[in-house]
Amino acid sequence: MSLKSGVLAVVDPLEALAAAARSDLAALSYPDRSWLEPLAGPDGRPVEDVLIVGGGQSGVVIAAQLKREGLARVAVLDRCAPGEEGPWRTYARMSELRTPKMTVGSEFGIPNLSVQRWFETRYGTAAWGSIERIPRTDWKDYLDWYAGVTGIRIENRTLVTDIAEAGPLLRVDTLVAGKPFTRYARTVVIATGFEGAGAWRVPQFISSRLPHRVYDHSYDAINFAMLKGKRIGVLGHGAAAFDNALAAMKAGAASVEISFRRERLPRTNPHRFLETGGLMTHYPGLSEATRWRIARFFREHDQPPPPTAFRAALATAEIRLRPGTPWLSVGMDGEAVRVETPAGPLRYDHLILATGCVVDLASRPELTSLAPCVTLWRDRYVPPPAEEDERLAALPYLDEAYGFIGRSPEHHWVDRVFAFNGLSAVSHGPHSTSISGHRHALPRLVRGVTRRLVLDSEADLLAGLADYRSNDLPIADDFEQRLGS
């Protein structure tokens, strides 16, 4: 509370925390001046120092870190409506995050900017102590608060349709509320999440045989109310399978069966093994063979569903697990869906396909010009026999700062574009762009972006130094005259 003009005013605790966080940021802001001169593009409009594609958790934190490094013109574009950036209020249906609550990295070492301090301020210290992981919607609320504190403004309903060379700049084509608009940037960071490597797709053997009204991908905006009283078949064993099964039961589904090919669910989460300060900081320094084999290990062994969702599913009598049950074919049987399996046919009223994302650079509009120009893992590394993997080979071979590498000298422009998303899974590990990797991965990215900008402006450095003037030694006029006499 505060007393102003004789009236007792109530101060919002989160606003007070925001003020404290801004004060902390200001106290640690040196050096705080912009170091790139404003630049006009071919259209006469200002050029962005960095343009970030994606306003989710990575995009917002990257923008905040770049601003702290003295970049004044950082734009964040997101295709979604305000408040719907990232998956947290759309297709993510888990009750809590996958990562431990103590994960840090977004707060720059400033406690008042941390999710823990935010959560304790909102709900109390005891509430923080009582949770194992941060609730999903609270995480999004924190990110929105964080963006406000750090001064990050997201340009919503903006779809990036291409990133291409424009001399010493990058041309970024967009659709803003459906209308074409082109802008220019010195560098671009693509922070489009896991799906940034391709697309969420329903398996072809399902999409080619069934009408869309009887199935959804787990990524879709599912109308769960329409599933009330129905028999639901879920394909997949990961987090999305269990999250959507629980959502269907909450909506009143009569039953849910989760089918998956594996005879046993994974018990161990290999992400936790990689989450050490050493590995997360120096992962790109590992040999190509080691990084390739780690990526293949994750493909072969995967990770278990979240413990909370798994326990909830086991505690729900109407949810049944079907291990060792691949779906061989599907078809309509009257109004029901018939699914053929090695154990015999299954019948459902609706299917939810938790089948993940395919690697397909050509499906990403922002990669239209980039995809043919960037080095892929298949261009740089030949795995030993029996270790081939076309999915991994199709991913970009990124430098140590998440930068693309051109396939030939004329493609040099691609090194001004950085992929902090699913495209980095082999080069930087399967964990680096997740929340748990931010503390160690983001500094690598930021150093890479700022290094590129410094080197691109090197030609102007000496002239700028010669022209630089400051009033470090102020002298009165009469004293100036005496010095000159």
Image (cartoon, rainbow, N blue to C red):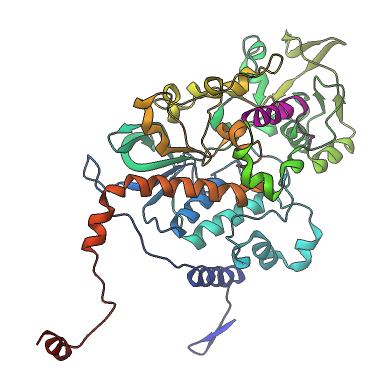
* Viewport quadrant of the C terminus: bottom left
Whole-percent x and y of residue 146?
A: 55, 58
Decide which of 99, 335 is in the foreground and name it. 99
Residue 393 can be seen, yes or no: yes
Instruction: Tell me residue 159's x, y (percent).
Output: 43, 35
Question: In the rendered view, does 397 fall on the left or right side of 279?
Answer: left
236 vs 48: above or below: above
Q: Is residue 155 visible?
A: no
How many marks the image carries: the answer is 0
Establish if 333 lies above or below 220: above
Q: Is residue 1 left or right of residue 375?
A: right
Assign the N terminus to one quadrant of the image.
Answer: bottom right
Q: Would you say 14 lies left or right of 66 here?
A: right
- The residue positioned 67% from the left and 68% from the top of the image is 121
Q: Residue furthest left?
A: 485
> Please, what is the dominant secondary structure of the magenta stretch?
helix
Highlighted magenta segment, given as a residue range: 288-305
Classify 386 as above or below 252. above
Locate residue 84: give its quadrant: top right
Left or right position of 432 against 467: right
| Residue appearing at x 33%, y 44% in the figure | 456
Determine if the magenta segment contains residue 296: yes
Whether 220 is among the magenta residues is no
